[in-house]
Image (cartoon, coloured by chain):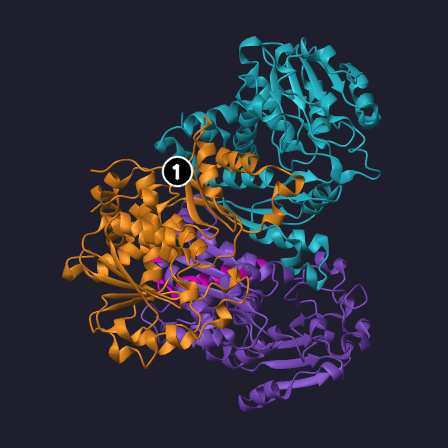
Chain colours: A orange, B purple, C cyan
Amino acid sequence: MSSEVFHIIDPRTFNRELLDELCEITDTSRALGKTPEGAAALRSLLADKRAMLYFTQASTRTFLSFNNACHLLGIGTSEIRDPAISSEVKGESFDDSMRTFSSYVDVIIMRTPERGLAGRAAALMDLIPRRVPIINAGSGPDQHPTQALLDIYTLERSFAGRGGIDGKTIAMMGDLRRGRTVRSLCYLMKNYHDIRLVFVSPPSLAMRNDIKKHLVQHNIVFSETAVLDDVLGSVDALYVTRMQSEWDEEEESLKVDLDDFSIGPNQLPKLNPDAVIMHPLPRGPEIDPVVDSDPRAMYWRQERNGMWMRAALLIKIFGVEEQLRNQR
Amino acid sequence: MSSEVFHIIDPRTFNRELLDELCEITDTSRALGKTPEGAAALRSLLADKRAMLYFTQASTRTFLSFNNACHLLGIGTSEIRDPAISSEVKGESFDDSMRTFSSYVDVIIMRTPERGLAGRAAALMDLIPRRVPIINAGSGPDQHPTQALLDIYTLERSFAGRGGIDGKTIAMMGDLRRGRTVRSLCYLMKNYHDIRLVFVSPPSLAMRNDIKKHLVQHNIVFSETAVLDDVLGSVDALYVTRMQSEWDEEEESLKVDLDDFSIGPNQLPKLNPDAVIMHPLPRGPEIDPVVDSDPRAMYWRQERNGMWMRAALLIKIFGVEEQLRNQR
Amino acid sequence: MSSEVFHIIDPRTFNRELLDELCEITDTSRALGKTPEGAAALRSLLADKRAMLYFTQASTRTFLSFNNACHLLGIGTSEIRDPAISSEVKGESFDDSMRTFSSYVDVIIMRTPERGLAGRAAALMDLIPRRVPIINAGSGPDQHPTQALLDIYTLERSFAGRGGIDGKTIAMMGDLRRGRTVRSLCYLMKNYHDIRLVFVSPPSLAMRNDIKKHLVQHNIVFSETAVLDDVLGSVDALYVTRMQSEWDEEEESLKVDLDDFSIGPNQLPKLNPDAVIMHPLPRGPEIDPVVDSDPRAMYWRQERNGMWMRAALLIKIFGVEEQLRNQR
């Protein structure tokens, strides 16, 4: 069916065929996991594999969703979540640490506060005899490809009865300048037809020019506004993000009036009745907890989708998607 | 046989039928685990389940006994033992963190230094679509229900040839005011007949009035003393506890002459030859290591019982006790 | 075939028969693990066992190789890598902590910064009813027996076509005074015939007298030099080690001209074409990364051998080596 995938570093390399196949693998796995027999079949799919979770940046949900995706597939996991307990205190180089991980496991899933380390690890792997795939689970401020994949899956399934993502209007709101999830998601939009993007943010935290150039190059229509009310009635999806205050240099977050970039009881009545509300989580005050019980709130399902999409990605990387399909 | 159980928060909700059934499940599991084939059957019982161990309070044995109980039953585990590595650094609310855990796993086992959080998590679960059971593995100074369960199991088995717990005299010694294990155990005594409790403590660390009221309400006979020698000859069980010095406000622990509330070579000859000595561990100087080789010392077996009782509890929560019995 | 082994504390207790058998078990396991069916057979070998990894000294590779060796064999693992999260904050004794671990698991693998703790744990185990094996994964500055085993395996396989280790000349270079891997490896040399050892180090970091006495007692020829060039052409193996600067009391490491005790582009042409280059890793500047692509560089394979040799050791400890052989 599709081409091979190995390292997962940059969402710009994903094509429509791969995205569609990953969505199909996710559906198939979830369906299979609903019975004890199916779950047992899933657990035997990759039971001879072992994963390294190297997470030196604080993370709850990316870590837990990958760890549990591994459990779903029978993959044994080892973790380093605190760089201080690693041998790096003895002054080992990053490259040597990565090569060491590759000696013991079959895939390295990594999240670092520094930019570009996942790509560097992947380049190293391509030079050594026992090459293992690298999955970028977040590398500093630039990319978060698996978050983008689960967002795509959630959008596709939310629009399942309406032709999927093609032709939809998607608003992204919040700290677009520094949020890596919206950046990665924008890159994937080139794979869909007739998308309209609306960026809702304070001017100080607007989407960066590199993304806008990318959209222009791929003929993706986008607009920008600081007024949420103008778009609520017409969007198919409202992707809300939090203030990335950890990247503040001059208290940029504090200067924003968050009321203008939040959704709560005042906004819900104005929102398109068919729209879905998404958020990569964790959330701050930008989504009022009363929204949780609105049928359009999709962020908790989106979160759980993350585990299943990450399982699908592992299935695809190790090339056992046919074995999965034969289990149906 | 018995009613369903879901959240495990407060030992006051346990009835005799449940306690007896959990003891029976514990016995059955232990017997099954003695052969490789039986152990394999145990590991398949809950192999499609995943657990979250959320332990933000320091713990060795509660953590290890739950983790290994999960391994016994094939349950995959994820752990957060250091709150600093979680996403809470990004300011996520407790409720959102719990809901996130529930997205990925089938049961949340939690231990916190704060009072009441397990109950709050359980209440949250009852409001969301993907509800998972919460097990309180210690919530601040108030309750520690699974410790009480393993204590009950140890007492029942220690008195197996003598009619079980009914009719026995149980002394509890040490820091009764602040020890949550003795508090939880007292609550369970209402499920047994003709129990006599003896509280042995310095007056400053005596059992609190809320527990005494509870005992009076349920017609459970109790007495208090500061003189261990008066009770050694007549007790069926001596439940020793350590000074809870971590809760000291005015060096309460340091003011106690621990010699009066300890067991060692001087006390052993006076102790009822049929009595058992218990302790929730870790111990301080209140049990001399020479006691370890006395046949009445039951605390190491009690500790190991904790793993098996916690496995039994998981079996009961997920309703696979009949499948277990069919393995015999 | 061979005698039983239980605790693994001190490499001085290993005899040739055991070393040969462990190498054979390692080969058999590796061969079996190459197919999914063989890997599944391996994972069932010890699936009813549980291990405790108690690593209070920083370690990446020893931890990961043991953890993944356990995964290879189906052993469930629990870990304590930060002593601050353990119950020892409540003042539990080392002996009680070890006995607690033994309540829940079937083997304790431990690495500590303090000398002698693994031996103490083993002595404790021999006194209690539920005795479990202790594996020393590094105890302070004295011994590191499993590193010595993987070094032996790597040497044996490197010389497979040339009669194995017997008769070979092995140079050890670097901080020989404080490196525990070379110390442990020296102890094992008595099991082989006609070995010649060459110690290459600055005089200030020369091999200690206790090892030299041991070599004399067992009639093992050794010589010492500070000039690497004198030995490069004649050695069969060059075992390079790093400066153990963490043990510096008076900046001993900083006073060494590391150029004299390193291997890089200038040394490679002079090295015996049949020699192998080994290193316990992590490496510092004593091996230039350009050496990695030299066919004589064996240290990355040596590292991966560590996982398989540790799996072999677990197989031997639990006495399932015959079941392994029957899988072939």
Amino acid type for the residue under numbered disc 1: Asp
How many discs appear? 1
Residue in the image at 73% along x and 78% along y: B231
In percent of width and height, residue A242 lies at 42, 66
Q: Is B115 in front, or is A223?
A: A223
Residue B44 visible here: no
Q: Is residue A148 visible?
A: yes
Q: Main secondary structure of the magenta part?
A: helix
Residue nearest the observer in this picture, C281 or C112: C281
Along the line of sight, which residue is nearer the eye, B310 or A76? Answer: A76
Task: Using residue B198 as the reference point, say whether residue A62 is left or right of it.
Answer: left
The image shows residue B7 at horizontal and vertical percentages of 42, 72
Q: Quadrant of residue C169?
A: top right
Q: Residue at x 18, y 52 (%)?
A: A193
- C92 to the left or right of A187: right
Magenta-drawn stretch contains B34: no
Q: Is residue B232 left or right of residue A323?
A: right
Q: Residue at x 55, y 89 (%)?
A: B219
Where are the magenta residues, as a range? B304-323
Question: Considering the numbered disc 1 on the image, is that residue within a helix, a strand or a loop?
Answer: loop
Chain under label 1? A
Q: Please provide percent x and percent y for residue C200.
A: 75, 19
**Which quadrant holds the N terminus of chain C?**
top right
Q: Residue, x 59% and y 66% (percent of image)?
A: B57
Instruction: Identify the residue under disc 1.
Output: A48
Q: Quadrant of residue A9?
A: top left
